[in-house]
Image (cartoon, rainbow, N blue to C red):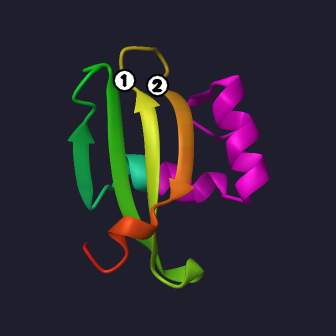
Amino acid sequence: MENFPYSLTEHGKTRIQERGIRLEWICDTVQNPQKLRLDPEDSSKCYAFRAIPEYGDRVLRVIYNRDRTPWAIVSAYFDRNMKGKL
């Protein structure tokens, strides 16, 4: 995690560990999203989406707070509803 350019909230850290999501997948998704959306209720939060080929092209959704420095990863999960939509 030395070269990880973002911070992790406690919730984010827990969820990422529980779900076995690699930090490099998170970085790639935030830095090179295939789709990006703002949270409709909280403009400080962004949703970044990216298909992960090593994981059967399942779509990773990373929620992060862009108002913090460095950006804070709030959560990440594989979004079943987005598979095949990117």
Instruction: Return the residue found at the far bottom.
Output: 56
* Residue in view at x 65 percent, y 41 percent: 3
Q: Quadrant of the C terminus?
A: bottom left
Give the number of the disc on residue 66. 1
Residue 1 visible here: no
Label 1 residue SS: loop
* Residue in view at x 64 percent, y 35 percent: 12
Q: Which residues are magenta?
A: 1-28
Q: Magenta span has 76?
A: no
Q: Is residue 25 above or below residue 76?
A: below
Q: Is residue 48 above or below residue 20?
A: above
Q: Quadrant of residue 1?
A: top right
The amino acid sitting under disc 1 is Arg
What is the distance, in whole Å, between disc 1 and disc 2 at their CAs?
Answer: 5 Å
User: Crowding at label 2, few (<14), some or many (≥20) Cα neighbours within 10 Å?
Assistant: some
Q: Is residue 9 left or right of residue 32?
A: right
